[in-house]
Amino acid sequence: MMGSRLAAAGKRWTQRFLTGIAWIAVFHPWAVLTGVLVVTAFSAYLASGLQLSTDIDSLLPKNVKSAERMRELFDRYGGSEPIVVAISGMGAEDVEDRIEITLTMREMLAESQQVAVVAGIFGEDPWELLDGPQIESLLLYLDPEQIDGVVQHLSSEAIEAKIEENRDTLRSPLGPVAGRLIREDPLGFLSLVLDKISKLKGALKIVPREGALVTEDESYVLLLIRPEGSSHDLEVARSMLSEIEDVGRRALEELDLEGSVGMGLAPADAPEGAIHIGLTGAPALLVDYHEILQRDIRSISGVAFLAVLALFLLAFRRLSGVIVAGVPLAVGVIWSMAFARLLVGEINVFTAGSVAILCGLAIDFTIHLYNRYLEEAHSGHDMWRAFQASHGEAGLGILAAAVTTAWAFMAAGMSRFRGLRDLGLICAAGIVLSLLASFLLVPALTAIAARLRPGPDKPKGLASFGLTPVLRFVTRRPRTVVALSLVITVLLAWPAISVRVDDDFRKFRPNSAPSIQLQRELGTRAGTSLQPIAALVSGQSDDEILEASSRIEQEFTALIGEGESSLTAVIGPASIVPPPSRQRAVLELLRRHRADGTLVPEQVEARLLESLARNGFRMDQRARTAARRVRKLLSVDEELTLARAEEGPLHAVLEDLLVARPEGGRDALITAYPRPNAGTTALVASARDAVERSGVHADLIGGRILSAEIKPLVIRDGIRAAVISGVGVLLILLLILRRPILVLMTFVPLLVSVFASVGLMDVIGVDFNLVSISMVPLILGIGIDNGIHVVHRFREHDGEDLVEVFQHTGRGIVMTSLTTMVGFGALIFADYPGLISSGVLAILGVGTTLVAAVTILPALLTLIRVRP
């Protein structure tokens, strides 16, 4: 009893408050309008300070391990994905020119403070890489099983046969090509090692050529560049790319070549086969994302705003109504953006659609208020009495619907993901602020229009949308409607249960980004996505780092092949410097052979010089140096450490694979390049299994790893938000309606729409992803509105004809549903696949809720009313 009295008292005070707003707005419209405009002007000033962010990493929860390691790597190393300079042209005809461009750019970038050219074992001159302290340690690169075979080929007969083979090769057409290698390495030790190193490129469709990377079909010459600064900072990324583009133009000018420079593929208007220096990679993607997101926000917001006003005009058929609807909508959006500026400070990929969403939702308040005002005006009431009914009666249902929608967004605002949390908070506040703008401005603008109008107002009613015959059938055949609806819901429930969640984080990437298009093209040409998975390995010493790297590299290499979980290439420190355990095994075998006399380096040197002389080779200083080098190779008795290797040309390569730690020491970076068609789930699972088999503690990092870790968190947060949203809506409805049976009836359209919309997503082949799955709790709050309005009108006019009752409210909910669908539907014009799927889900969710609200819900209420 006490609860009923409190609820009744709360309802009375709420009605008085709302009718008080209507009285002030009707009788003092200019004062209300002036006050609103002042607040709006200040809000617009605040909103102008909103920043646009495309840094997805900053939106992630702080407790995701791979995200933390990626942030750490960005700060220490600049990023795990390189900038790729891809030079296209006429294929084989101009490949030499494009290689010259690459080498010229490499030289020019050597002094850069922002970027460093990746030494890249695949594209360097092999001889230069081994021409240093490690040249005397060549045999340490071999497997222990190869040593016995090497020793057997050092007998007098074997050396003689090898030199005769070299002589014949020099006399053949291949002589000019093989001459240097034969004279510098007459016994072929270097060839053994180079054969081992050449296997590092795995299944990559690239070949090293004159110090550059060239795709096998010669369509692209590649240069890999590592950011030295924080590549996820927009201004830093722009500065890096600007410097590289400038270097590209200078290289073309220096070589007197014609060509273009820019992000992505060659311009569409460029001559066929013209040289183009294209850029892609993480910094290029960041800059592209920013420009495209900026364009997306303008386009989807503009489309949503104009579309809902066009629908309003079509439904109410009054030009003055466009002002009555448009001004509160614009004011509510501006106030919401000012709140966003104060609360979060920026717009990101998650919140990019917030203006479109608010346009679709906020217009609902004006529609219901204005629709009720027109009903009362048609009944002969003056403006004050009409708005007294509009605010005092319809306003309660509008307020209840707004509270439930705001609560659904607040449930999303409790997420640990900053992007989803920001969207929830902005839209929850936007709903409340837009509701206030509608309550104030709809009566105020209507009153101003009436004073400026020379004749009496003759408003037209809201279009019926053909509801009358539908509602007559529903109220006459309620059992048939309910049975048919149940069958359809069950049929759609099955695909809804089996719907798949796409956890590919790359779906955040816009389809039209020039850098994305070039990246896809290179994936096909080079055989890899150029978006690697990396394993970060720590060690107390260089020996530990090499041993750990070796084990992981061995397991990763086993994944090279075909299939969803396959890789194309693996590179790490142990690919450049053999692990100590393998070096020790080789040294032990060499010592054993030297001890038992089967390997005497001085004798091998003498035999080599004698054989060279017998076969007519020039016995000059070069020949004696080569023989002395062979003696040193066979006399090796010391391990090749990382410190020694870094003293020579290998320093540049190792610098890309070793990351210094702030507290001292360093980590190893083992990079695995996946195939372009590698599936995220299968690939990540295989990489994790490989690390586990290696027995090494390593942190896997990369965009795909991040996707796999985020998926369960998103699902868990989505379920929690849906539960919080559902429970909150239930409590709000119990407080407002106070009858469990009416609360249950209100939930029916919502439950039907959830199953139907998710099932239809599967039927039309649209997958859930990390953005669209977060829309489910929002649909709970948005979809309940239609049921609230129908049940509220049913309860307030229980004695009237049901068709009339449902028809008046039905017009309003059809209109509000259409505007909401248009607002959310504007998301399908975005370039981001995640936003597009969110728009599709929202359209299906709101659309199915509308169908259920004008069919199933009236049928159920009819059955309740006629029941004895």
Image (tube, rainbow, N blue to C red):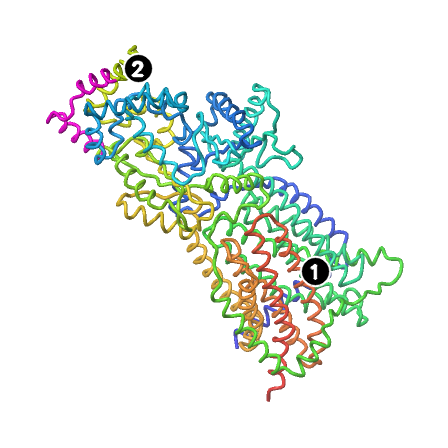
Q: Residue at x 34, y 48 (%)?
A: 688
The circle on residue 366 is 1
Please determine whether, in this image, residue 748 is positioned above or below residue 703: below
Is 102 in front, or is 174? 174
Which x, y percent locates residue 322? 76, 56
- Sequence order check: which comes first, mark 1 or mark 2? 1
Q: Secondary structure at mark 1?
A: helix
- Residue lying furthest bottom: 868
Amino acid type for the residue under numbered disc 2: Phe
Residues in magenta, as a range: 582-611
- Please identify the dominant SS of the magenta region: helix
Q: In the picture, which quadrant includes the C terminus?
A: bottom right
Mark 1 → mark 2, Cα distance in angstroms: 97 Å
Which x, y percent locates residue 457? 84, 63
The circle on residue 617 is 2
Is 868 in front, or is 477? 477
Q: Secondary structure at mark 2?
A: loop
Residue 475 highlighted magenta (yes or no): no
> Is residue 225 visible to the viewer in this orientation of the structure?
yes
Amino acid type for the residue under numbered disc 1: Thr
